[in-house]
């Protein structure tokens, strides 16, 4: 069994690549963002830690996390973002590692994580695939995906690392621009991985 990390900035196409990989019978995808959502429901230690850090106003009336409010806080405040990341790494990384241990019936496990390197998850990966794309295209994708304006998309992208931060640490780099055939690219990588 091999563990492969997928990372890159927002708008680079990680979700699309994970969807392609999910269709492969021998692959199991662990989506770090989904794990975060599953672990931040009422009654969890992670949500309690977020509430303690950010106050009760971070919760909706029904006790669920107000993701929009939290998003606004962390995008506009470096310290708040660092504090949330610290909590996320503490709770979510262990959960991802536990899930990897419990998967027995797949040849390849994919960890789809925007903060793969920051969380130290690359240490459990045999390979890391990084997706990059032209800035204009990333902005366009973020606007469409999150239904936000260009200025907001640019500011979100602006707080993330430059592509070089990812490519320097990658085993494989996919330049996911408009003419990219993601399925073909990943099939070529898998052929090399399985050699």
Image (cartoon, helix red, strand yellow):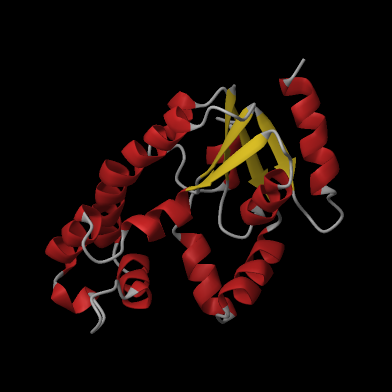
Q: Residue at x 66, y 36 (%)?
A: 27
Q: Residue at x 75, y 50 (%)?
A: 176
Can residue 120 be seen in this snapshot? no
Q: Above or below — where is 19 with respect to 173?
A: below
Q: Residue 124: x and y, percent?
A: 46, 25
Residue at the limit of the structure toward the bottom, as seen here: 61
In the image shown, does 136 or 20 lie closer to the viewer?
A: 20
In the image shown, does 16 or 109 lie closer to the viewer?
A: 109
**Image quadrant assignment for residue 130:** top right
Q: Above or below — where is 64 with respect to 117?
A: below
Q: Residue at x 60, y 69 (%)?
A: 142
Q: Above or below — where is 16 with respect to 94?
A: below
In the image shown, does 56 or 28 lie closer to the viewer?
A: 28
In the image shown, does 152 or 61 lie closer to the viewer?
A: 61
Q: Residue 63: x and y, percent?
A: 23, 76
Residue at the limit of the structure toward the front, as seen here: 105
Q: Residue 147: x and y, percent?
A: 58, 80
Q: Residue at x 87, y 54 (%)?
A: 179
Compared across the picture, whether 192 is left or right of 35 comes to: right
């Amino acid at each position: 069994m091999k563990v492969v990390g997928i990372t890159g900035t927002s708008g680079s196409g990680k979700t699309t690549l994970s969807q392609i990989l999910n269709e492969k019978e021998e692959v199991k995808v662990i989506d770090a963002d989904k794990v975060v959502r599953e672990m931040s429901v009422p009654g969890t230690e992670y949500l309690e830690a977020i509430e303690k850090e950010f106050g009760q106003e971070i919760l909706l009336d029904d006790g669920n996390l107000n993701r929009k409010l939290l998003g606004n806080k962390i995008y506009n405040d470096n310290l708040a973002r660092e504090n949330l990341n610290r909590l996320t790494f503490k709770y979510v990384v262990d959960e991802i590692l536990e899930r990897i241990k419990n998967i027995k019936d797949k040849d390849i496990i994919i960890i789809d994580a925007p903060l793969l390197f920051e969380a130290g998850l690359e240490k459990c990966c045999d390979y890391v695939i990084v997706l990059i794309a032209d800035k204009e295209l990333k902005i366009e994708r973020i606007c469409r995906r999150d239904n936000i304006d260009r200025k907001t998309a640019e500011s979100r992208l602006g707080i993330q690392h430059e592509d070089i931060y990812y490519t320097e640490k990658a085993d494989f780099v996919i330049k996911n621009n408009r003419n990219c055939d993601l399925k073909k690219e990943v099939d070529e990588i898998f052929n090399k991985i399985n050699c």
